[in-house]
Image (cartoon, rainbow, N blue to C red):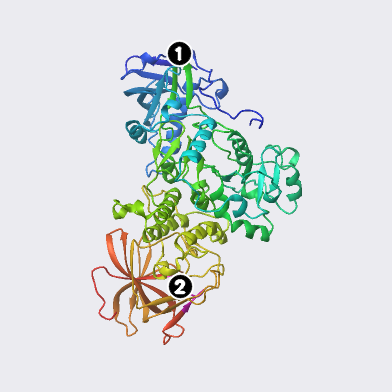
Amino acid sequence: MNATNSASGAEPLNSEPHYIPFPLTTRICPSCSSMKLSGIQVGKVFFFTFSAEDSLDPRSRCNLCQLFQALYTAHIENDYRHTVDPPDSKARKTTRSHLIRVEIMSITSRQMGQIVDIFVEDTWYANGMKRQLCFRDPYHSPSKSSMKKRDPEREAYDADHGLLSAQWADLALAKTWIRECIQDHTDCGSLVSSEPTSGLHPSTRFIDVRLWRLVKLEEIILRSPIQYIALSYVWGREYQLKTTMETLKAFSRRLPRSIAGEDGSRRLPRTIYDAMVVTRALGYRFLWVDALCIIQDSSADLGIQLAQMDVIYGLAIITIVARGSASSDSGLHGVSSPRNRINQSDTEVMINRGLELSLWNVLGEDEEYQETRGELADRRFYIWRGWTFQEQILSTRNLEFNPTRMLFRCGRDYSQQETGYPAVASRDMRDPNHFRHAIRQFQRFRANPELKVGLASHQIMTKDMLAARWDTIRENYSTRSFTSSADRRNAILGTAKVLHDVIGDVDSGGHMRSRLHGELLWYLNTEPSGNPPPLMTFPRDPAPEGILPSWSWLNLWPLSWPAMIQPLHETIIRFASDAEFGKDTRLEIEGVVLDMKLRSVNEDDTERMNLLAYLDGTVSNLTLRMDSPDLKEDTVVTCIPMAKAIFNGYGGKRDYWYFKLTPVTATSEWVLRLSQNMLLMTLTAGSNQKDKRK
């Protein structure tokens, strides 16, 4: 392959972890190797060879030519993924040979090098796109240590333009972040107050990464409380090594050493193996992994361990997060496999001793964007899985391994990233990390009321504000997926326990018992909001019948709550008993009831609205949006006024009267017992009309 330019236009545990300061690329064609930093000028045009995958062994191709071909093909395969119109593939063939044309559009000089805006297009087809590169002299670039201090100007630039790519995770830097947080961040404490030795059940197991086996807490003899790391990852549907009653004895002697699984033998999934490598590299001995540290076919052990998820993740020194993964074999990006590869092409290229090229902001946007609108917008991936939700909330510190970079999150309002400068923490109230920060704020103000002095009311986290955020974060949870939807309650037991300890009236199902009017006003919403909204489909997802009470928010997903709720206190809602939440938990609602009949049905693109009439046939101005299966016309329903609410719909803010409905069984009753027979429906009144008979 030739490139022409035109002036006209898995390692063993006893070795060090992967970290390569500069790429070791040597496959550069003669034309590309002649490039110089001084030759990168606005208006200059370069042509790179476009070779079909089957025409040449990729291992022998020029890495720079391969990179620009990969940029172009990734643009066609990924950037058009969610567009309505297909890419313009009209042939034009402006050159004899099939080439990739790259034009330098603008150059910005920064400390780390020249940030270059380029336009990449195929000379045979009309599909082009813009990208950013960083050209620099690898031996005259700033070190990572010089980039650790916060610089507002540079942070603002990074926020707008992205970060330099890096193939391998800098675990030495991660070790520094953890040490500094433990030593200097007095406000980064755990959400739970106990110590591991006293807070964890004696039967809790860990992986000893030195002895390569499972050990029980009660078997570990230490002079100080145990320090351990937890793993948060996705199991996936392919392969998962599990501890069972059959394998427990063997795993307590030795875990599988191999990740290959030769001859049908058991093997360690890549993500767990990588986490063990990282644990040892960070200087720790014990690792907690759910699949191996819980006996998966023991209901007794499952009950003990699920009940202490808040303690397990809250007391871990740090949680390793396999973000961007879709299975236990995805591995940790940057540990066992290089990051920032596009179509198997390196995104760092050492062109010659005086010139290195790196992609600037490889995926075009941050992780959140990719998870809602890009390559990771798929419910198989980490951020869309149900079990990872509370693991993000409960962890004291997170070390995220993403497809493009490694991030460190703690209790501060910014996150550390290995290439670039600290980034401002997410302000999205649907982000589990933001919710953890809100809990910490509430705990801080409650413990030290003097901190409120001089602050505006919106800067002080109150119980009402935290409750509102709990509603919002539950909307996020309802968009996540489970292999079995029966796990919805189990997967938030730890979070519910923390909230109960913090604000006092949250049960094991996450219901706020002192705010039952609001608890019942959730509604089915298959188009969740966001900024930007996710370009994904969220089908109606009911829990298996008989698993949960139908009035519970855990019963039907995805859902939303109104933005503001004004309860009607004349209607009294209470639990039928003080027993812990379960499938048979019943509510009693006492208030005025109104019998109505279903009349005509109006269908639109988003929901099915049913018009209601009084029993004498007079049509009302009330409409019924049903979350449950459709009822037949003329069905009589009993309506109970609950609250007045406001939410942001397609037409802006509108006033709604909310009711819960149940089929008429005894219309003379003033107290309705709602349990598994309750229909999940929402009754709304027109925004500009008043019903005189209400």
Q: Which mark is residue 679?
A: 2
Residue under label 1, please give it.
31
Task: Report helix, strand or loop for mark 2.
Answer: loop
Front one among 342 and 266: 266
Alpha-carbon neighbours of circle 1 within 10 Å: few (<14), some, or many (≥20)? some
Q: Which mark is residue 286?
A: none
Tell me the kind of residue under disc 1. Answer: Ser
Image quadrant containing the C terminus: bottom left
Residue 163 % position (x, y): 41, 31
Tell me the kind of residue under disc 2. Answer: Leu
What range is drawn magenta here?
673-680
Q: Is residue 325 left or right of residue 142?
A: right
The vertical placement of 639 against 187, above or below, is below
The vertical placement of 8 against 179, above or below, is above
Task: Residue at 37% x, 55% y: name it.
Answer: 449
The CA distance from mark 1 to mark 2 is 71 Å
Q: Is residue 526 visible?
A: no
The extreme bottom residue here reads: 668
Secondary structure of the magenta portion, mostly? loop
Of the image marks 1 and 2, the number of the one nearer the N terminus: 1
Front one among 8 and 174: 174
Residue 518 % position (x, y): 39, 67
Magenta residue check for 677: yes
Q: Is residue 173 left or right of residue 283?
A: left
Q: Are marks 1 and 2 in contact (CB under 8 Å)?
A: no
Front one among 190 and 154: 190
Residue 647 % position (x, y): 32, 61
Residue 549 % position (x, y): 51, 70
The vertical placement of 402 against 519, above or below, is above
Magenta residue check for 541: no
The vertical placement of 655 against 408, above or below, is below
